[in-house]
Image: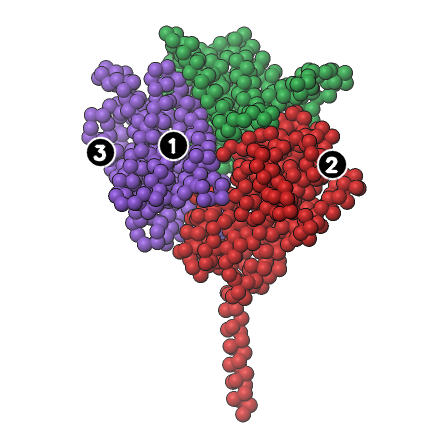
Amino acid sequence: MRGTSMKLGAAVLCAVLAAGPAHAADKLKVGFVYVGPVADFGYSYQHDLSRKALAEALPDKVETTFLENVPEADSERSIEKLARSGAGLIFTTSFGFMEPTLKVGKKFPKVKFEHATGYKRSDNVATYSARFYEGRYVCGKIAGKLSKSGTVGYIASFPIPEVVSGINAFMLGAQSINPNVRIKIVWVNTWFDPGKEAEAAKALLAQGADILTQHTDSAAPLQEAEKQGKLAFGQSSDQYRFAPKAQLTAITDDWNGYVISEAKAVLDGTWKSHDTWGGIKDGMVVLAPFTNMPDEVKAMAEETKTAIASGTIHPFQGPVTKQDGTIAVKAGENAPDPMILGMNWYVKGIDDKLTQ
Amino acid sequence: MRLDLVPRTVRSPLLDILAPTLAFVAAVLIGGVAVAALGVSPADAFETYFVTPLSEVWSLQEIALKAAPLALVATGLAFCYRANLWNIGAEGQFVVGGLAGGWVGVAAHGAEGFTVWILPAMLIVGTLAGTAYAMIPAILKVRLGVSEILTSLMLVYVAQLLLDYMVRGPLRDPAGYNFPQSVGFDAAARLPYLMEGESLHAGVLVALLAVVLATVVLARTLFGFEVRVVGASPRAARFAGFSDARLTLAVFAISGGAAGLAGISEVAGRIGQLQPEISPGYGFTAIIVAFLGRLSPPGILVAAIVIALTTIGGEGAQIDLRLPLDLTRAFQGLLLGLVLGADVLARYHVRIVPGGPTGRPAT
Amino acid sequence: MTLDIVQMVLVTVLTAATPLILAAIGELVAERSGVLNLGVEGMMIFGAAVGFAVAMQTGSTLTGALGGAGAGLLLSALFAILTVGLAANQVASGLSLTILGLGLSGLVGANYVGVKRDPAPHLAIPGLTDLPGIGQLVFGQDAFVYVAVALVGAVSVFLWRTRAGLTLRAIGDDHVATHALGLKVRRVRVLSVLFGGACAGLGGAYLSLAYTPFWAPGMTAGRGWIALALVVFASWRPLRVAAGALLFGGATVLQLHAQAAGLGLPGQLLSALPYLATILALVLLSLGQRGGGSLAPAALGRVFTPSR
């Protein structure tokens, strides 16, 4: 009797021990593909923060890896390499990765893909992005209040809808305080190039802008603003420590919650392809603490933030007039998502012409 | 005491092959030291860089896909470089070829019925566009003596900006939410795939064909002879009546055409549409390949494969060993430098001559 | 446009021109001795990375600048060994060093991306710096700018007013004859290449220490190539190098000013202007030369293999 129970006990023990390492080998491998360097302290940096958050949140279930500086023209191979090395969930974090992600997705139907800032999905490719324009609206209001010269400078990267809608939202926010506010826009044709961004900042400041904002990733414009005693907004990441006297706030992307919930869904088997476009309300757009501004402006900014989150106000609420005079959004309505997603026109009040 | 270089009167074929091989080994050894300094085992690195990519069908395909445009562009460049004409603008010619051929693809989108002509038209237009673009530095050099190094290089930036403008403007996909990319090409406008897996496309064959053709032309035709002589001895070439100007135009045409063809092959094969970036620097990497391959098409083919292998190995190393991609780039630069140095050994006897400061041997 | 704005614009032009002047002056000396160094871009960016790293470690801009110059010197030493010592092909060797420099810069700079340090200190002479209209421009710049200006003058004097400079130019024109005369062709060439490399490295260090207080991969963005073009455009004369640098530095910066001022041209066209301008300048230069041959040092780029 004792012998049998001992053998049984031993068998159970063996089974448990055997199951142990096998369970560890079942960790979900999650891969991340970045278009820029992790250390840009901007866009790719924030994505990498979400990777780190994931690794911290689910250390026993998940193993992460990443590839940085992947040029869009050559990305298919990198994405496929991650899929081949056993990744079960892959985040491709730049618009230009869209077609390669879909292509690799077709080849690896069991792997789940998440493409940031894109618009094409498939059964195993989901998309996600953040409503950056909400943050821009708040910044615009702050700028409207604080600009003494009435001119703001905007350092823009590429004329894609995401950037254009940001410019428009910023302008609408500023116009709600000062209807005569002027905006000067410089296109630098890059997401990250401190030298060029600094040059653009100098040019804008020389032309009379006293508040700068940017849709590029380095802290160079902030630095330049601080050097000249002006104010500016940070981008993608809280860049306060680069310009403690100049940063008003920064629009930061917070992908942590989304990444963790998607990974959990894969682990649970409940993952489905969908589109997520989160804003302030969902915690995907976070505004860095408001600094270098008088208390009543701070209060106004907080109020605006809360109002957007609750839906009381919408950055593109009607009436919104296009540069050419036509009404884009009627009074009492809000701009529908597709319009914002494909925005390729400026609002009235912007002097520059957008290249069509 | 000084270093003297005496040209060898008889070239030893053994040395010709040994020299670059030794250079390669030296580069790998230095790379191993660098890798160890970064805290990674050199043996692991060697395996990841050179062995692993060769062990899978998929990565072999990827090597071929990367080596093909390199070999094609470099073969064209070899014609220029042998004639001592320094075309640094292959990247621009690549882009222009891809853009022009891609334009045809976009224009033919949705065409029905007789569509067989689309792909050949794209390839031809791309090649001709590359040629035409290369004619700019060529004509400036022939007519005005302007340095082709600088003009061809400046035109690279212009070509990239032109592509950017077209893709964001006139060629933008109207259904694409105003993102900068053209409509995806129809199947008739794509290079056919060679195997299952939808990766390896016919562009690889095009490149191989070009290498073979170039080998034959250089070795067996009068034109090829001209090219080889002009580089080796300009005076002899002039005595033989080979026209400088005509040759300049011809080799630039070949080089630009090859780069343009590579560009449209990449667009019609790999990418399938026009987007702001269609080349991860092939035009520049091809310059390394051309020199590594000692300006001879078969050598270029080998060099292209080596470079492709190390680039893909480098990506694997980034994932598995956390080694930065810059290491690969530094390695490739180092390799080229060592090959150039080793080439000297193949071409000259190196003598260390003892003697006074005036250099006279102390006999 | 007030005087202040004009001055601000001029300051941006001057600072944009400075790295070009530094790199081009060095290359001018190398080319005057007969060596074509296409590795300038690699030496510049390696200098930018090393300069930043050294400055971060030591806390001093000066040592950073020296470090950057040293980095450029190191790479150019490799180039000198290849081309002057071993008579290898100068174009290919230069390119190999560009790629090596790019790769090494990424490795050295990897830990410093996104790190910020205080920008290089600017001159501030009470009274002079505050002069309206020109105070900032002339008396308010950082040391790099003044060094660049000084170098233009120094190289000018050296090449045309000293014996050593005459020797160097003679070697660049005819290395066979000068060698026969007993002049040390290879030694002079090595020294001028090293000088060129140090200048390129210093120009790179300027970008990461003063122009912006950051290191970013690829931050030279082709300035090394523009510097090469500048030397040709300037017909190998130092003062013209400075003028050309102001023109081209200005073109790059002015397109941003034009955008900020609301000029409605496509951004890509404005971005392409400096490159098109370079080609145009080279063409005009050649047109102005008809019948007179090239102004380049006659032995530029030719391989030198003395057998005795």
Disc with the residue nearer the chain's start (3 vs 1): 1
| Coloration of the structure image | by chain
The kind of secondary structure element at disc 1 is helix
The kind of secondary structure element at disc 2 is helix
In this figure, which residue is indicated by the disc labeled 2?
A145
Confirm whether residue B102 shows in the render: yes
Q: Nearer the viewer, residue A132 or A91?
A: A132
Residue A214 in the image: state x and y as whole percent: 62, 37
The image quadrant that residue A352 belongs to is top right
- Callout 3: few (<14), some (14-19), or many (20+) C-alpha neighbours within 10 Å? few
Chain painted red: A
Residue drawn at point x = 53 percent, y = 49 percent: A116
Mark 3 touching mark 2, by CB under 8 A?
A: no
Residue C42 vs C28, above or below: the answer is below
Residue B216, disc: 3
Residue B39 in the image: state x and y as whole percent: 54, 48
Which residue type does callout 1 highlight? Answer: Val
Q: Which chain is disc 3 placed on?
A: B
Q: Quadrant of the C terminus of chain B?
A: top left
Residue A8 vs C223, above or below: the answer is below
The image quadrant that residue C307 belongs to is top left
- Colour in which chain C is drawn: green
Work out how far the residue at label 3 is from the one at label 2, CA to CA, in angstroms.
73 Å
The kind of secondary structure element at disc 3 is helix
Task: For marks 3 and 2, give the one nearer the viewer.
Answer: 2
Which residue type does callout 2 highlight? Answer: Lys
Chain painted purple: B
In this figure, which residue is indicated by the disc labeled 1?
B96
